[in-house]
Image (cartoon, rainbow, N blue to C red):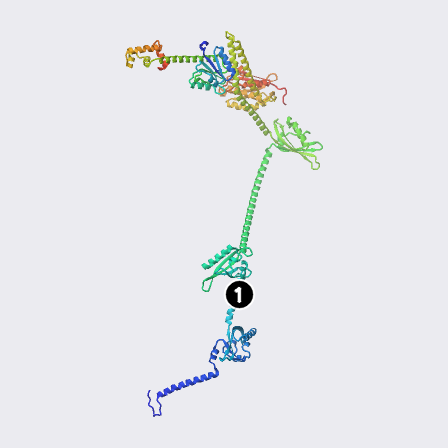
Amino acid sequence: MSRPSPAQSVASTAELLSLRRQLDALEKRVAEQVRTIRGLTARPDPFRAVADSSYDLESWIGTDGRLVWVNRAVERLTGYTAEECLAMEDYPFPLVQEEDRERIRQAFQASSSGNDVSFRLRRKNGETIWVAVSWQPIDAGNGRCLGLHTSIRDISDRKRAEDELLQQQQLVTNIIKLIPSGVFWKGRDFAYLGCNEAFARSAGVTRPEEIVGKTDYELAWDPDQADYFRACDRQVMENDQPMLNLQEVERQADGRQAILLTSKVPLHDADGKVCGVLGIDTDISHLKEVEAELRQIQAELERRVEERTAALAGANRQLQNEIAERERAEAALRVSQERYRLISELTSDYAYALRFHDADGWKIEWTTDAFTRITGGRALSFGVNGIWHDLIHPDDTAQLERAWQGLLSGRSTTTEFRIVGQDGKVRWLCDHARPVRDEATGRLVRILGAAQDITDRKQAEEETRRHRDLLAHMDRLSTMGELTAQLAHELNQPLCTVVGNAQTAQRLLAAPVLDIAELQAALQDIVNAGKHAGQIIRRLREFVRRRPFQPVLLNLQRLIEEVAGFLEADARQHGASIQFDIADPLPNVRGDPIQIQQVILNLVRNGLEAMSSIRTSAREVALRAGPAGAGEVRISVADRGTGLTAQTASHVFEPFWTTKTDGLGLGLAISRSIVEAHGGRLWAEAGPEGGTVFHMVLPVAEESPP
Amino acid sequence: MKPDRFEQARVFIVDDDPGVRQMIARMVRSVGLEPETFTCVKEFLAGWEPSQPGCLVLDVRMPGESGLDLQEQLVRSGASLPIVFISGHGNVPMSVRAMKHGAVDFLEKPFDDQALLDAIHAALARDAERRASERLRADARARVARLTPREREVLALVVAGGANKQIAAQLGTTEQTIKMHRGRVMAKMSAGSVAELVMLAQLAGVIAPPA
């Protein structure tokens, strides 16, 4: 960098460069000086620049109350320029919203300094923003006050956040206050930290604040309920797990038992540690009631449905029953109609009506067809005595006359009587007759009657009675048989005594020396034994005649007919037959019908038994009855048996004389005593063609039945 | 059948009917026999002496024990009192039973006097015979009882038909000795002959009676 210097007058490059550097530094220094001087003149304080660039609205109010300085933030915040503010006499109050202005002024006057006092600032464009003002005096450092420094900060964001927070808090508070559930929260010590009004009411405190610090044991619940709550709280807090929707029954402060749906959740502090428990319980009593009510209603509905169903089923059944019943009734009616038709065709019942005519008395008004069938189509006349002429059996007219008198006196009558048909046959009728009076006059005007043919019934009754009587006879006969077996033994003793003594007496008489005393004793014993035997025989007779003897008029024909059935049955048993030969008419006799029948029965049986040794085809008994001589009737029974010798014929009627191995020999003896008691005779003869004939003759009764 | 043959005999009559009882007693007396009456079986058993010769007229049907019951009792006890039954109402099975058990007769009341008296006499005869043979047997047994043992041996061999020589050989002695024994046996037995001796031996039961 060396360059030739022209003469001592020319300086070197190095010197030039150094000079340049010195010049530049001088220029820089001058500029700085200028700048400093300018700064000192225009902005004499370097803090002012800092203040100018501050975000908040900074201002300096002189001691005379006039604004000395304001930073550039004033324009952003208020919309006014610094100059406009400097022009204001009463800065900063013109910027304060009128409602807040007095409060702020008083605050300024009250204290030389203040911090963060909020008010609404009215911007130049009319908007209002929330600001906070702080102020303090400016100290010159030598104890001299230079004025008041104010700093205004835009707090609209903060204010908005505060408002929002407040609103949120109010919302939560309102929710807690207004929800129908009880809400409470407790600390770790189980003491209440707070609750809503609903919970306070249930807990028995007047305001929610009163619950703070209390435990469940100091509230309305029962101790065991409090225990339960405590246990739940502990569980929630220790496990850090919520318990949700527990149903509990709780006695309320008003004494009501409430059903509560309770949930408890753990509360956490900033570190996430459990610091308490929050609970909410909802009274669902009414829900339960509603539920119960619903159930009741449902049950009631179901019941009604069932009832209705049952009623319907019942009605259905009834309907079906009615249908079935109607069908049955119709069927029964059809059967009944058919039956009635048949009855009316076949019946022998009859009905009739009689009417009273003033002119000629009672006349037949009408009769049914059956009536004419019974009467055989004869024209009937009706007598004044109520007798259907030519129809009624003569024996029954008296009875019918009495019934007729009863009808005329207004009584209904039932009469059983006989009618004699055109063919002469006798039929029994049972007649029910009813008198009918004229409603107006009360006079007897008609008689209605209906009758049944009871001939068969009467015959059956008669048959039954006859059989019963006959069975009674049989019974008595067999009883007699048993008795006679015993009597036979008794009788044998005196007989034996008589025979033995008599023979001994003969022997004594034949002896060389007559023992008179022994002979007399023997004879006396014979007498005694004979008397004894007589007594036994009398007892037997008394037995046979135990039934009082009542002689009545007997129709022998009927009497024989009655026992004929038994006789034929006996004959069949013996392999024999019976020939009846009964004269007609047969005179009547008088006596005991049973005893006479006993004799007939006995004779026929004897005959049958006498033929037991001959061949079956020849076994025949002939029973004949007819008049015999002067006022007598004879009944004969002939058999074809081995017959009697002249000797036996004389013995057969002796008691205990018998040819039979199983007989006692009393039948004929008794029979003879019966016949003789009736004034008749009974004897035996050898038959003209072998065998034996027994004849019974009875006197004819003086008076004969019609 | 003379009455005096039954001088000692008694006719026992058992019948509950007093008339019949007295009648039979009278009938028995009328032929010279001695009746003794009893009203029932019990009374008879109390009063009857078996050694007394006689017979029994017995009613079948009686209150208490029947006549047939009494017959059974007598047969069982070995008594051989002959019985004549009388019955008021007899039947065949009853009479068969009575006859099988040794009844003399079975008569139905009322009976003929001669029939009863004949039966009574037959019964007494049977009783007398029985009693006579019983006496003979007792007598024979008494004679045998008097023999010595040796004489009984000789008796047995003699009635068996042995000769003296054979008997001597059988008994291991001499014929002479047997002869002496035999003589004593004949004397003690009061037997006139060997045949008589045989009969006596049979009666005494030393040998079986001939078949």
Report the side of B106 relative to A463 (left or right): left
For mark 1, name the chain: A
**Residue A238 seen anywhere in this rendered image of the structure:** yes
Tag 1: amino acid: Gln
Seen from this angle, which residue lies furthest right?
Answer: A359
In terms of image quadrants, where is residue B183? top left
User: As rendered, which of A207 and A595 lies closer to the eye?
Assistant: A207
Mark 1 nearby-residue class (10 Å; few <14, some 14–19, many ≥20): few
User: As rendered, which of A184 and A509 lies closer to the eye?
Assistant: A184
In terms of image quadrants, where is residue B149? top left
Q: How many marks?
A: 1
Image quadrant in which the N terminus of chain A is located: bottom left
The residue lying at 33 percent from left, 88 percent from top is: A2
Q: Is residue A407 above or below residue A2?
A: above
Image quadrant in which the C terminus of chain A is located: top right
Q: Secondary structure at mark 1?
A: helix
Q: Position of residue A628 (x, y in %)?
A: 59, 17
Seen from this angle, which residue lies furthest top?
Answer: A512
Q: Is residue A604 above or below residue A78?
A: above
User: As rendered, which of A501 and A193 lies closer to the eye?
Assistant: A193
User: As rendered, which of A33 and A699 lies closer to the eye?
Assistant: A33
Q: Is residue B70 above or below residue A38?
A: above
User: Circle 1 is placed at which residue position?
Assistant: A170
Q: Position of residue A474 (x, y in %)?
A: 55, 24
**Residue A688 seen anywhere in this rendered image of the structure:** no
Q: Position of residue A227 (x, y in %)?
A: 49, 56
Seen from this angle, which residue lies furthest front?
Answer: A143
Q: Position of residue A133 (x, y in %)?
A: 52, 74
